[in-house]
Amino acid sequence: MVPKLKHKKPGLVYMVNCGNNIFRPQFFITLRSDLQSLEREHCVFGEVAEGMDVLRKLNEAICDSDDRPYRDIRITHTVILEDPFDDPEGLQVPDRSPEPTREMIMNARIAPDEELDETKGMSAAEIEEQEKAREARAQAAILEIVGDIPGAEMAPPENVLFVCKLNPVTNDEDLEIIFSRFGKIKSCEIIKDKTTGASLQYAFIEYEDRKACEDAYFKMDNVLIDDRRIHVDFSQSVATLRRKGKGK
């Protein structure tokens, strides 16, 4: 007796339903549980027996607003362990998996084997010089922002977070999506170099209320975003006020 598979766990293999119970020769694999929305919609015909760690890693991939991973995820090779059916006459079995097309390669995504370590091949002195230059640009931008505050004694708003150590590929929209689960965001801006337009790898996020800002502060520090562990704090001056006991 074949057991009935329920739509409630990762690793289920589905055949795509095009409507009117017409199924395409396409399949997908669930990466999480509680997918009752798939009930009576798509057909479960199998489940992953080994390699759940791979599915967990796929589920952790950082995606854009269209739910597409920034780093390409591709099936590079498949192996048929058992085929109970006879091969049709004239079937030609390829000796290797097909190569990706030019369109697949030229898609402006991070390649699976692409290194994101921008310091690779640099000496310790070059890395230190790069960090100093980046910090100098960041400090210049911060001083410019601080210069807009009317008075030195004026306390900055307590609904603004300072986020740093960002990956250069992270953009405003994706950062806002990630942080918006704590509350409504009024503005989210990654600070960029005025000359090159490159990310300076830090941002300011303004919430509508203080509680949402505090929730994000406690939950998001040291979280992995685009393969980088970020640091989250209240805006620098607010953190200073809190340390001095002046924060409300």
Image (tube, grey):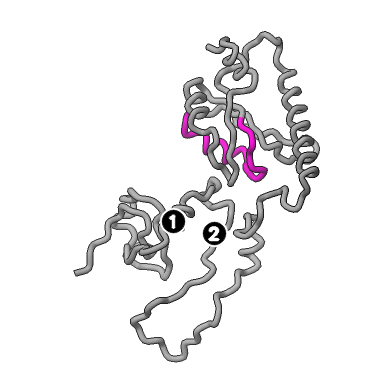
Q: State the SS at label 1.
A: helix
Quadrant for the N terminus in the image: bottom left
* Residue at the spot of label 1: 53
* Residue at the spot of label 2: 73
The residues tagged by marks 1 and 2 sit, at their Cα atoms, a distance apart of 15 Å
Q: Which residues are magenta?
A: 163-184
Please, is residue 146 above or below residue 110 in the view? above
Q: Residue at (57%, 10%) from the top-left corner?
A: 246
> Is residue 246 or residue 31 the one in the foreground?
246
Identity of the amino acid at label 1? Asp
Query: Percent from the top left, x then y, of residue 110?
Result: 63, 55
Identity of the amino acid at label 2? Ile
Q: Earlier in the sequence, mark 1 or mark 2?
A: 1
Residue 177 visible in the picture: no
Query: Percent from the top left, x then y, of residue 221?
Result: 54, 33
Please, is residue 103 above or below residue 196 in the view? below
Query: Percent from the top left, x then y, of residue 88?
Result: 41, 87
Q: Residues within 10 Å of mark 1 (few under 14, many from 20)?
A: few
Q: State the SS at label 2.
A: loop
